[in-house]
Image (spheres, rainbow, N blue to C red):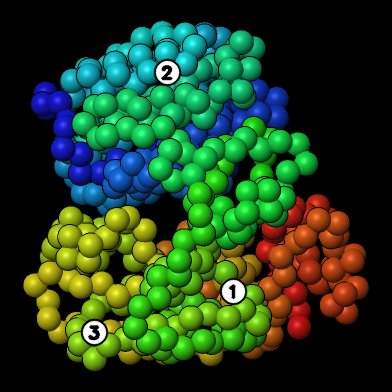
Amino acid sequence: MYNDLRAVKGVVVDAGHGGEDPGAVNGNIYEKDFNLAVSEYIYNRLKELGIPTYLTRSTDETLDRDERVDRILSAFGDDPNVIVLSNHINSGGGEGAEVIYALRNSDTLAKTILEEIGAEGQIMRKYYQRRLPSDPSKDYYFIHRLTGNTQPVLIEYGFIDNSNDLNKLQDNLLTYGEAVVRAVSEYTGTPYTPPGEGGGQVYVVQRGDTLYSIANKYGVTVNEIKVANNLTSNLLSIGQRLIIPSATPEPPISGEYVVYKVNKGDTLYGLAKEFGVTVQELIDFNQLASSTLSIGQELLIPIASESENETNYYIVQAGDSLYSIAKRFNTTVDEIIKSNNLTSTLLQIGDKLIIPGYTNITPPQEEEPSNLITYIVKSGDTLYSIAKRYNTTVDELKKINNLSSNMLSLGQQLLIPSTENYITYYVKSGDNLYSIARTYNTTVDQIKKLNNLTSDLLSIGQVLLIPA
């Protein structure tokens, strides 16, 4: 049994289930949605407290067991100083929260989490270990059994099929998430700051609210709210908690830069490659909330110094992870994180990484295709169907995206070579497919086919490709 963890190396926040795996279901209420909501909240709050944190999924994505475990072990390495918080909702008619911890660990963290959730009014069932019936020396759940030396806890916040618990989950899930944050803070000896203190205030979304109206109310920008809350779209839900930044941050401009106006077909990857910077540098320099660009948008492009140009880097490619890069260069994820002063294990295509022990890494010489679009994988997609739709080949898609198999997951981003021009359109309030098609002189059927839509329903902030 490991000693209690105090010097945390990192926390992996795991949103259980997802995509084609809904988890427990009650009518039209799915466990996977609860799991993602509380996981994103915990992830953002731990980052606020300065704890290195990784989120296994940030979209409604299908993750098989092996991929989930690989992401967990790739985040901060296979190390007993890594906490894994696997978030779940129970079923079976019981009531209350419970926490399951691994056979290799002590009960301290599990007990602390359950007590903090109980302090928020939820019934505390128990914290315990569960053994595999066929081999009692092993853990029952794979999240404990297959995650190496890390310290995983599986948190069941309540029962989806119990009316009392379901009401609590719908009203208090993020409050329970904050309880977990307090528990991790206490367990690791990290100073705890309540949400909003020292970095703005917390606003609870009301009916009729939009990011624009909230930004106006508090004198900040929509982008500042999105950055503070790690939002990737403008969609809000009633009861959602938003951190409102207290002041507009100054642009992180130092040294020389040029102003670039985004043209049709531009991508952050292509611009980073053209100007000799990284995708992450462009995102940080311009305080972008996502990697999506719009035509006419102005970007500040930092000009690298001579000393920086003389440094040799590894250029991140599609499909790379810190784990795969570390394995390729016979080093560790932790060493790469230290060498590059990384605060997250998330990578962007085009990022430049210093690899410990390597002083002359030749970047890939292949040129990016002249016109790439980003496609989000949807239910029913295959590499063959996508290649056919965009008049390319499966081999070309695999080559550009550095794919080693034909397997795709919901929400996965693919770079697609295209000989045609497309407009990226963001759905606004009042839009429908007919009005958009009419504006851009195309048809509803063409838009649906291009975007693989199975219905005419649209959501505010949804991204559509429109034939130019």
| Mark before the other along the chain sequence, 2 or 1 | 2
- Label 3: which residue? 308
- Label 1: which residue? 293
Amino acid type of disc 1? Leu
In this view, 63 is above or below 212: above
Q: What percent of the width, then of the height, locates residue 456? A: 83, 55
Give the crowd class for mark 2: few <14, some 14-19, many >=20 residues within 10 Å: many
Amino acid type of disc 2? Ile
Q: Are marks 2 and 1 in contact (CB under 8 Å)?
A: no
Give the crowd class for mark 1: few <14, some 14-19, many >=20 residues within 10 Å: some
Q: Quadrant of the C terminus?
A: bottom right
Q: Secondary structure at mark 3?
A: helix
- Label 2: which residue? 117
Q: Secondary structure at mark 2?
A: helix
Mark 3 → mark 1, Cα distance in angstroms: 26 Å
Q: Are marks 2 and 3 in contact (CB under 8 Å)?
A: no
